[in-house]
Structure formats: structure tokens, C-alpha cells
Amino acid sequence: MFDAIIVGAGFAGLYMLHRLRGMGLTARVYEAGGDVGGTWYWNRYPGARCDVESLAYSYSFSEELQQEWEWTDRYPTQPEILRYIGHVADRFDLRRDIRFERRVESARFDEAECLWQVRTDQGDQVRAPFCIMATGCLSVPLEPDLPGLADFTGGIYRTNLWPHEAVHFGGRRVGIFGTGSTGIQSIPVIADEAAQLTVFQRTANFSIPAMNAPLDPEFVREFKARYPEHRAHQRLGLSMGSGDLEVVARDRKPALSTAESAPQEEIDRVCKAYWSRGGAHFMTSIGDLMSNEASNRRVADFVRARIRAIVNDPATAEALCPTTHPIGTKRICVDTNYYDTYNRSNVHLIDLRKHPVKAIEPGGVRLADRFVELDDLVLATGFDAMTGALLRMDIRGLGGRRLKQAWREGPRTYLGLMVPDFPNLFTVTGPGSPSVLSNMVVSIEQNVNFIADILGHMREQGYRSIRAKPEAEAAWTAQVNRLANATLYPKGGSWYLGANVEGKPRVFMPYVGGVGAYRKACEAVAAENYRGFDFQRSPPALSSPSGTQGA
């Protein structure tokens, strides 16, 4: 038996294990993949990069770690991130407590013993007072609704389950479905190699150039010398990325408070400056961009004008201009040469709204008006986000109540961390937390530290169980909804709402108030003796600070 079971060995699972060890608690981690990395273990598609800058997309808990690790580019590639996570696992000797290639199938709470009983697909059965879900927000791939897909005789490659061995597209005719963040990253890279690339687009998305480049050693040296100040800004949500060095000297403010009534030349000046700097930072250019439709429309018009200026063919350019949602209400994409790729003679765009798919056939894709011969298909069709990994497990709490039942009308949590009727079960960056609307590593560290502090409080007070109070869950869920409804986010029809999954309740899942406001809310809860949580002194006890021997 252990003090805690952790599900997932990505950024969240590794840091949770490290924190528990530091408290003298024992833990066992179960990971479906063959190594550490979480989403970065599975997503090896061409062009895979993080859209948060490397100097920020990293742990802050160890000064030695953040000083010694050398990032290569402004935006890190998947292989580099995976090497970093592997380095962390080795440096802190974490792998010895992880069991790989084990997918957790069920987690059931034994009320009499106050223990979670966890079972994996490999027959592992283990018990612990606490179960911590570090399953990630983007970890369950979606199967596309493409009739006849199984009949295709060429290669089929899913971006979120990409082969570990090299895939070569030289001389081949490739089709790709999906133009979200993953598709936008992979399309330019595949186009460089394939004889022909056909992009099947259902929904055009807004994308901002990354302006990626190798990191300048002098910039890195100066940045690392002021890491504590940068980290403090990131924890308050004042910087999504590494940013400019002067960011530590002042609060980050938008260049314009509103674009609704600003002169066009002023909007163009601001947007061009932010476009030239690159990255998701573009979305901070206008103060009311995500709450004022008029402001949003004028910024969206700027981006659409840029697309038309880049793409030579007017019909293709128009098809690439998003018109179905306000900018930013679907995840803003960050790219390298995405729109320029459509000027290549070997790249063709098919707008599925005008030319729908009738069927996938053995040799290609049958559209309503033509047949596209293909050798390979790439599926960049997204995830069952935020709740998918949790609901695919059979999680049962008090009275055998299933999490699927508790969330049948959409996910409801307290602080994104706990659900009533599921004692001692924590969800790291779960629905109701900033998670996917933030730098994930910043949010992960905050959540893990909060959970660790709760466990320390329980040990000091002799508590054996904790659960969220229903009224606290209701109030927090109402606040999450209220904040979301004050923005344009619900108009996006995005995976933030679960709109990409047929039959999934349409509930806006992330907390849009920002990591700074969320952190303050958690600190206020802790300061008030963990208001909203119900503690009980039922057995069994946690181990002593010196630790216990796990089975």
C-alpha cells in the first residue's frame, strides 16, 4: 500500500511525485506510455512545438534545474521537451516509482477502509488513501467521423499517436484532415517533403506567426539572472512566455484598452507591432479583445487582411480566413510559415463546407464533386479535452457513484481540484481551473503545491479524508460560468466547450479569470482553514514524515 496513487507521468505527475517524496510520503505512478512525458510522449507529429516560450515552459521548483538546462529555440520542439522531461526524471530519480505501459481502468473508493483501490489494464491492483489524477487536458484522441476510413489501403497517421519510428512522405501524395493547432504546425513540414499535400479544412482557424528563432546566449544569460522576477510575473499571469526582459520592471498592460472606437491607423500600428513580435502574446494587444465584439472584429479583420496579403490565390486566401468565430474563442494557433505554405505548387486546400466528404475509399477521398487520390492520410482531428481521460476510467466514489454520473450534465468541481462524493481524489488542472488558458506548467505547479499543502495540513491535524462541499462546488461552478459568459469564449464553439465531441455537454470548462486571480482564490481558501472542504478523522492514517515502505 502507498500513501498516494498518481495517474500520469507528464509534467503534473512527475512534480506531484517529487513533492510527495519531499514530504516523506510514498507514491506509485501509473503511466500508459512507455516513458515519461505525457502529451509530449505521444504527440511526435512533424513540426510539433509548444506555443509557450521555452524559458517559461519549464519547472520553477528547482533553481539548479532552471539554471542548468539549456533550451535551443524560443519555442521548444517536441523532442527537446521530451529530453527535458526525461532529464528531470533522471535528475530527481523519479522513474523508480513509475510503472509504465499501465493504463488505469478503474479507481474505486472503499468507504470502510477510506482507501482508493486502483486497477490497471495489466492486472496491477493497489490501494492508497489518496488518488491524484495527473492525466492531462489533451490526452484522449478523437476518432474522426470519416465514413470508410477503415477501407483506406495507404498509411494512416494520427498526430496524437504518431509512430516512434521515422515516417517518410517523400514522393507520396498525402492528405491531412484538421486545421487546428496540430494541423497548422504539421502542414508546412509535411509540405516540404511530400510530392503533393491536400489539406481538407472544415473550419478555418486564426494563426499568428511564432517568429521562432534560436535563443541568443546573451539574452538567456540575462533572463536567467532575473528568473525569480520572471517567475513571479508568470504566476500572476502577467506573462505567457519569456517575453521582453523589461517585463519584470512593470505590469504588462495592453497597448490599447479598446479597439472599438480607435482610429484604424492606431489599430494597424498596434497589431503590426504584436504580429511582428509573434506568438500568442498577440492576444494581449487590446484590453477588451475577449469581451468586446466590436474590438474583436477589428482585430480579426487585421488578421484576415494579413492572410489575404500572404496567400497568392484569392480563393484559397478567402477559404483560409476564419469567419465562424471571434478570434481567440477557439485556441489561437502559433505557426511557422503556415499561410505561406499555400503558395507552394504541391499544396492544395479543399474547403469541406463547400466540398463535403462522401467517403474514404481504398485509394483516396471521395468528395461530392471529385476524387482525390492519396497514398497517406494524416489525421489531426483533436482531443476529447479536459474530461476525456477522467471519464474513460471507471471512477467511483461514495455509494459507488460514478464520475460519469456526477458529470452527466458537464463537469462540476471545486477549484478544478475536487468533486463532492469523491473523497481524497484530486484532479490536477481539472475543469474549473485555468489549465489550457494558461501556461500549463505554471498552473500545474500551483495545483500540485496546493494539493501538497492540503496533505500536509491533514497530517498535522490528524485528518484522514477530505472532500469538496456541494455548496462550494456549486458556487465555484457558478463563478466559472459567470466569468466565461462575460467573455466571447462561449461563442467559439470550441473544445473548451466540448463542442468537438458529439453528445458531450456544452459547458465551458476552463476558468477564464486568469492564473493570478485563481491563485488568489486558492490562497484565500487556504487562509480560511481550507474553506469549502470537509475534513474527517476516519482511518487510515498517513505515514509519518520519515515515510513508509510501499508494496
Image (cartoon, rainbow, N blue to C red):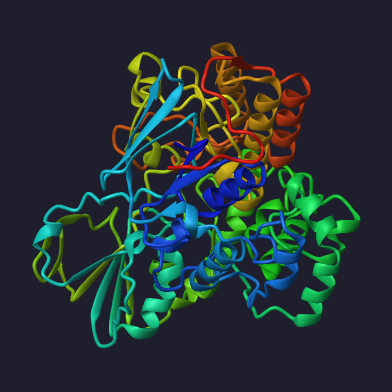
The image position of residue 542, as x and y in percent, is: 58, 29
Residue pictured at 52% horizontal, 26% vertical: 424
Is residue 110 among the parts visible in the rendering? yes
Residue pictured at 33% horizontal, 47% vertical: 103
Residue pictured at 74% horizontal, 51% vertical: 234
The image position of residue 82, as x and y in percent, is: 51, 67
Measured along the vertical axis of the image, is residue 293 above or below residue 222? Answer: above
Front residue of 218/15: it is 15
Q: Quadrant of residue 61?
A: bottom right
Query: Position of 313 compared to 446: left or right?
Result: left
Query: Position of 11 compared to 285: left or right?
Result: left
Query: Position of 271 compared to 152: left or right?
Result: right
Q: Quadrant of residue 518?
A: top right
Measured along the vertical axis of the image, is residue 345 above or below residue 482? Answer: below
The image position of residue 318, as x and y in percent, is: 43, 62
Is residue 321 among the parts visible in the rendering? no
The image position of residue 74, as x and y in percent, is: 65, 72
Residue pictured at 72% horizontal, 72% vertical: 68
Q: Quadrant of residue 63?
A: bottom right
Placement of the N terminus among the 4 image quadrants: top left
Front residue of 72/52: it is 72
